[in-house]
Amino acid sequence: MLFVSLSPSPFLPLKCSTMYFIGALALRHTARCWAARCTMSTVISGNKTSLQVRERLKRDVDKMGTQFPGFRPGLVVLQVGDREDSNLYISMKLKAAAEIGINANHIRLPKTATEAEVLHSITEVNENPAIHGLIVQLPLDSIHPMDTERVTNAVSPGKDVDGLTSINAGKLSRGDLGDCFIPCTPNGCMELIRQTGLSVAGKRAVVIGRSKIVGAPMHDLLLWSHATVTTCHSKTADLAAEVGRADILVVGAGKAEMVKGEWVKKGAVVIDCGINHIPDSSKASGKRVVGDVHYPSAKKRAGFITPVPGGVGPMTVAMLMENTVQSAKRFLQTYRPQRWNITYTKLSVKTPVPSDTMTWRSCSPKPITQLAREIGLLSTEVDVSGKTKAKVQLDVIKRLQNHPDGKYVVVTGITPTPLGEGKRTIALGLAQALGAHLNLNALTCVRQPTHGLDFGIRGGAIGGGYSQAIPMEEVNLHLSGDIQAVTAASRLVADAVEACLFYESKQTDRDLYDRLVPLNEGQRKFSPIQLRRLKRLEIEKTDPATLTDEEMTRFARLDIEPEASIWGRGLDTKNHGQSPMEKRWTRTVPVASEIMAILSLANGLEDMRQRLAKIVVTTNRSGKPITTEDLGISGVLAVLLRDAIKPNLIQTLEGTPVLVHTSPFADIAHGNPSVLADKIALKLVGPAGFVVTEAGYGADIGLEKFFNIKCRSSGLRPQVVVLVVTVHGLKLHGGGPMVVAGQPHPKEYKEESIPLLEKGCSHLRRQVQNCRAFGIPVVVAVNAFKTDTNAELDLVCRHGKLAGAFDAVRCSPWAEGGAGAVELGEAVQQAAEEPSQFRFLYDAELPITDKIRTVAMEMYGADDVELLPEARRKVDLYTERGYANLPICMAKTPLSLSHDPERKGVPTGFVLPIQDIGVNVGAGYLYPLVNVMDRSTLVPSKSHLPDSQVQSWHQLHNSPSRIKMENFQYQKRRDVPLYVRAVFFHFCLPATLYTVSGHSPTSLLPGTRDRP
């Protein structure tokens, strides 16, 4: 009979831990006499057995490292407080882990730590894939109340190597021994029993004690080893009789020598888990360690017995290491080096392809929390908004700063038709192919679709067909409010200038100073932003009382020129304010605002704040620039944008991740997704993964700005350029008739026309040349339409290769999803391995005119540039102010390589006129205006306000599981200017939604239009 005694004493963890470091006697034989007959009692050495276990574990860890180079099991010991006994036990665990080869770390929280802080630390360890075991050292030595049960149950069951969570305990009680972690002391007891060679099956076992740490799990282990088990405790009647029937006895009652030798059945296996101290004058300490069994008398009757010390104690640490290694083995069963453990959504492709709305609603997107976890984001690094979108915290960059970046791919296109070339559709399809079909980590970074003015229909979308990001409607509406935040910030700047003008016109210098530096409890104090202004004014003082009258005037009065109009008031769907003071402001949409460009180019929160502080808002009467820092609002601008700076995480139809962030125009701004989105993505995908980002409009505009502006700011260098081209686009550049949004395509685009296409391929060759100018391999992606013939597609591919592209392949992600871009994905993989030598188009230190001329001649094919008088004046002004070393952001039509949108193909023999030059000091570039643009009026002649109608929320709620907005569509417009893209808008009121009836919300978007 087996007898196990477990102590319910609250000091049991302390007692068990003490056994970790107490030396054990060597395995030996002792004589004993039973009824005048001598027999031998075997002492089971825990030290010897634990050494054997550790040597075996060390071999297992070495084998893991051989199979997966660089891999080591990870263990964390979490401690609250600084108890000396806990420190000693932890040091023993760390030493044992180091000897085996386990990467063990000690996290010590102060005694002041709250339960919430402890739970937060546990969550971080739970989500760290490099950690396979987590021990919460008990007791929790905090000055605050702690729910020990709640804390221990917060440990992930898969990392609970102590085996203390309710889930592991429940699995053990049900007999699921292969799917749980067994508490270390009972597991060590079972290992010692196995050392005797005795078969547990069919034996009678007695366990004294029912604690959660030893008694209860020991009972379950013996039971599922097919023993007949009796658990005894303080209420058990005739304990001696129960003990006398035990073939196997396990004792852990926490009472010194409570089990007498005469109780023990002859030949029984006795496992003593107790640790007690009794007085002993012969010892230097005045006490000695004994177990719960009277060892001298018990060893005369037992067949096998464990000593105290040197029995169960050493086995507890060994079994802790055993569980950690076992956890690592389970992890490696699904581990793929440098690969996400991600599930993809299988598409059910239909022919013909349904509308974009019907396509995305036919799929079931993964919960965004699942997607975040699959790509390696911690729960603390995402701010979830609903089930399908989340903000990504910038802390992830710091956590992964030492991780290598992935492969960087930028998608651009030829000079587009009014319907676009489908760059975003190709970008999303390429990521779906790389991820869902080629089993690589792949993440797409795209810009956010933009709102137009007064419900206009300008802007992009989010792909189309079976290559789109979802939830489509939310992305095409407000998503997470980033554009609205930029709008608010833009208005704040204008309001601050107006307020300054008003107060300076009404108050004296002293009154202004008193308002800026008010008395507070009899003292004045400069704020940090005011101290920076003093430094710029070369006033080396920090005490407000020491400023002279002249210095107070310089500090308090900006002396803004009332007629100056540099900053544009931000708009969304309404023009606010028509007072005489406000009428002097230009109207600027948020996506054309410098604030949007800053948000896109910033490398972090502090970098954004510094850039915002450099924004030149207006000038004073002397013509000197006035910045937001002078107005004292750079800090509050950063506060307004603190959430907008975080990228938005969504997914494609096939479940690959997408980061949507910022939406700067590609004409007046640089037209690329944010630097931060790209940096986060590159860290997440790892060195074998791919990040697919986009560059707006054609390669001559968006790609040139991507390299010369964005790459200068970010320090990132792409490995591959993907150039998107369509047969329709090349036919247009070959002299085909104009394509008008909303009208049927002319027959030339529906029928095979090799001569027309052959002529248009000259434009393809020019754009390949533009791409190769930066020293990066180019892959041409031919976006196939159903009306394209094989001969036409083959012709385009052949010309792409002849132009110098690494490869040219046809693809059809709109109709097939990622499966339609697999060949493109394979070509991109191969191109990424090619050696490249990245180079900028020009040196930023060149004079302004030379940089403009370089872009015009190298990218557009101009013979020269002509600076008109205002542009020449700005060159001199900006050179004098120190802006000459900024890169160039050309503002020109996207519909031609030249400045004339009607000239298609490869225009020659033209001089590029530069009418004016502006500067975005905060964003960090100069923008020459080739075509003078009104940044607020690029809207259709008729908005969709008359077509809007109200539907109640309940009318739209057709499913108990999610909102289905079947009528969330809008009507195609036939009076849209050629440069306009369609976008879907709504205006929200409580319990109502404005919707527009008609066709698919994205049917006019690049890559998502109805196929002819």
Image (tube, grey):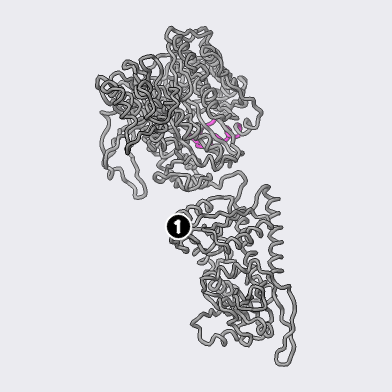
| Quadrant placement of the C terminus | top left
- Let me know if residue 163 is in the magenta part: no
Tell me where residue 357 appears, x and y as whole percent: 39, 37
Above or below, comparing residue 684 to residue 224 in the picture: above
The stretch of residues the image draws in magenta is 811-827
Above or below, comparing residue 654 to residue 579 in the picture: below
In the visual, does 90 lie left or right of 522?
Answer: right
| Quadrant placement of the N terminus | bottom right
Q: Residue at x 60, y 55 (%)?
A: 75
Q: Residue at x 62, y 23 (%)?
A: 775
Along the viewing direction, whichever of 972 and 879 lies nearer the viewer? 879
Above or below, comparing residue 593 to residue 441 in the picture: above
Residue at the far left in the pictured view: 579
**Residue denoted by label 1:** 115
Q: Amino acid at mark 1?
A: Glu
Tell me where residue 178 appears, x and y as whole percent: 59, 64
In the visual, does 450 lie left or right of 166?
Answer: left
